[in-house]
Image (spheres, grey):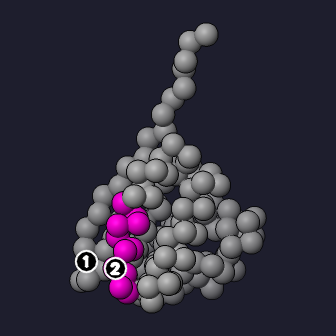
Amino acid sequence: MADNHTRSVAYHTTRTDHGTTVVTLHGELDLLAIPVLSTVLDSLTAGAEPDLVLDLGPVSFIDCSGLSLLCRVRSRVRSRIGRLRLVAPDGSFLRLLRCTGLVGAFELYPGLPEALAGKDLAGPASAAVA
């Protein structure tokens, strides 16, 4: 039997904007992508008071392992008295958070400029999704 497994394509870009580390995640956040992304995010959250923005806009799919990674990053950032912001421009990620009971667990923004400005829009964004 031929082994026709396709490998998910996930990659990231990292930059710093006025002391905030911005990581743009691309592709699928699934079981195959998590080991590499976990190493990167562990490194970025290893120091004291990490200030991290994860842009999920280019992410096409998130499974339970991807959601688990985001929760792990959140815990690491909080334990180091830091800040984690997620950019989720469409409602699909918010629906995922609602289904899993995590809707209030993350600081959510509709775009990168809002996340970098620090305007917390999680309340209105949460209310807008039915």
Q: Amino acid at mark 1?
A: Asp
In the image, residue 43 lies in the stretch drawn in magenta: yes
Element class at badge 1: strand
Give the residue type at disc 2.
Answer: Gly
Q: Residues within 10 Å of mark 2 (few under 14, many from 20)?
A: some
Quarter of the image that includes the C terminus: bottom right
Q: Is residue 4 magenta?
A: no
Q: Residue furthest top?
A: 1
Q: Alpha-carbon neighbours of circle 1 within 10 Å: few (<14), some, or many (≥20)?
A: few
Residue 51 found in image quarter: bottom left
The residue lying toward the viewer, choosing from 41 and 62, is 41
What residue is shown at x 49% (from left), y 39% (from top)? Answer: 8
Q: Tell me which numbered mark, 1 or 2, is placed earlier along the sequence.
A: 1
The picture places residue 18, in percent across and down from the top left corner, at 24, 83
Q: Which residue is mark 1?
A: 17
Nearer to the camera, 2 or 14: 2
Q: Position of residue 93 (x, y in %)?
A: 61, 63
What x and y, as percent, mark residue 124?
62, 83
* Apparent side of residue 54 relative to residue 5 in the rendered image (left or right): left
Q: Is residue 107 visible?
A: yes
* Viewer-side label of 1, 2: 2
Which residue is rendered at x = 42% and y = 55% of the image?
37
Residue in view at x 55 percent, y 18 percent:
3
- Above or below, 53 relative to 24: below
Question: Which region shows up in magenta?
Answer: 40-50
- The structure residue drawn at horizontal position 54% and vertical position 62%, both measured from the top left corner, is 69
Residue on which disc 2 sits = 47
Q: Secondary structure at mark 2?
A: loop
The reply to whether dot 1 and dot 2 touch (C-beta < 8 Å) is no
Relative side of 119 to 11, left or right = right
